[in-house]
Every structure is written in structure tokens, then in C-alpha cells.
Image (tube, grey):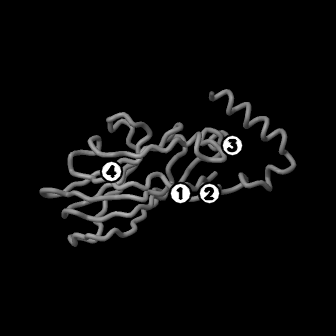
């Protein structure tokens, strides 16, 4: 598969030498925001590997596969995750990026812990968004896994739905 992408990249560059510097891959490239999941899930403090997780196949979902983007010189990427959430119990919420579905911290790439609405509990959903900046493209092969967590004293449950992602590649 890797040889296929190298051949594809080589042929692409050879066939577009006159246009390559002026095409959409000459600078930052944005993958428009896309839906990962609409359905509602409950996140508890049972542990990051005992929660629902969302998987994004970086090589099949977009116009240009992630492998191709690495081969044409994209070194870093920003990943923005946006979702609707509501807090059921006091505590902190966690959003974690992994590069495998395996239940192991060996595949952890980055994470963000936050407190949505402080200690206020809500019956209504609100939008939250976080950008993981400057991630190396080599941190991911073909898979991005969004994991969720909760921590604090006693129950720390929260709900999320309508998860969306936007990716910006940088050379």
C-alpha cells in the first residue's frame, strides 16, 4: 500500500509540474468540517478504555489520503473537535486523541481536559470546541481515534453528541 502512494505521488507530481506550485496542495490544506457521529453517548469515570470512542479513517474519508499528504510534504496538522455536550455530574471532561483502537496508552497522541460550565449541571446541550495544534502527521498512520474521559470526585458523568472534526495540514 505504501508503495502505491509513493507511485501515486510521483505520478501526480510528474503530471502536474506546471500546476503543482499553484494548486491546492502548495500551502496549508483544510479538510472541511465533517460529521463523525450524531448520536448521543454517556461518558463516565470508568476509564478512557471503557467508554465509547469514535474512529476516523484518515486514508478513506477525504479527497487526499493522509498517507499521500505526508508523502507530498505535510509535516504537521491541527485537528479541531467540536461537539454538543451537557454535564450530568460535577467533574472534568476529557477529550483524547489516539492512533489505534487498542486499549493501551502506548497509542496516546494528545489530550485536553476541561470543565464545561464549571460546577453548573445542565439539562441543555451546549457547543464546545478544542483545537489540537501542531500535531505531527507521522503521529497517525491511517486512523484517528477520539476517546473521551471523565475525572473528579464521585460521579463525573457527561453526555456528548453531534461530534464534528476539521483538519488543517501544514507543510
Q: State the CA–CA distance, disc 2 to disc 4.
A: 25 Å
- Bin the neighbour count of mark 2 within 10 Å (Cα to Cα): few under 14, some 14-19, many 20 and up: some
Secondary structure category for the residue under label 1: strand
Percent across and percent down for residue 135 are: 49, 50
First-in-chain label (2 vs 1)? 2
Contact? badges 3 and 4 (CB < 8 Å):
no
Indicate left or right for 21 with 138 as reference.
right
> Which residue corresponds to mark 3?
72
Q: Residues within 10 Å of mark 4 (few under 14, many from 20)?
A: many
Q: Which residue is mark 1?
A: 166
Side of 53 relative to 31 (left or right): left
Instruction: Indicate the position of residue 101 as horizontal and vertical percent values.
Output: 39, 37
The numbered dot on residue 30 is 2
Question: CA gap, disc 3 to disc 2?
Answer: 15 Å
Q: Quadrant of the N terminus?
A: top right
Q: Are marks 4 and 1 in contact (CB under 8 Å)?
A: no
Q: Are marks 3 and 2 in contact (CB under 8 Å)?
A: no
Q: Residue 24: which quarter of the image?
A: bottom right
Labels 3 and 2: the sequence-earlier one: 2
Q: Which mark is residue 148?
A: 4
Q: Earlier in the sequence, mark 4 or mark 1?
A: 4
Q: Earlier in the sequence, mark 2 or mark 4?
A: 2
In this view of the protein, which residue sits in the foreground, 2 or 159? 159
Q: Quick check: 121 above or below 146?
A: below
Amino acid at each position: 500500500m505504501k508503495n502505491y502512494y509513493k507511485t501515486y505521488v510521483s505520478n501526480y507530481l510528474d503530471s502536474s509540474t506546471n500546476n503543482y506550485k499553484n494548486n491546492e496542495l502548495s500551502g496549508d490544506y483544510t479538510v472541511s468540517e465533517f460529521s463523525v457521529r450524531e448520536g448521543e453517548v454517556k461518558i463516565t469515570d470508568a476509564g478512557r478504555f471503557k467508554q465509547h470512542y469514535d474512529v476516523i479513517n484518515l486514508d478513506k474519508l477525504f479527497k487526499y489520503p493522509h498517507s499521500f499528504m505526508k508523502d507530498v510534504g505535510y509535516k504537521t496538522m491541527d485537528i479541531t473537535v467540536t461537539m454538543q455536550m451537557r454535564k450530568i455530574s460535577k467533574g472534568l471532561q476529557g477529550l483524547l486523541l489516539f492512533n489505534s483502537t487498542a486499549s493501551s496508552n502506548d497509542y496516546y497522541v494528545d489530550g485536553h481536559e476541561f470543565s464545561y460550565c464549571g460546577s453548573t449541571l445542565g439539562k441543555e446541550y451546549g457547543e464546545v470546541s478544542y483545537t489540537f495544534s501542531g500535531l505531527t502527521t507521522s503521529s497517525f498512520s491511517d486512523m484517528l481515534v477520539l476517546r473521551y474521559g471523565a475525572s473528579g470526585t464521585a460521579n463525573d458523568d457527561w453526555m456528548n453528541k453531534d461530534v464534528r472534526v476539521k483538519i488543517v495540514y501544514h507543510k
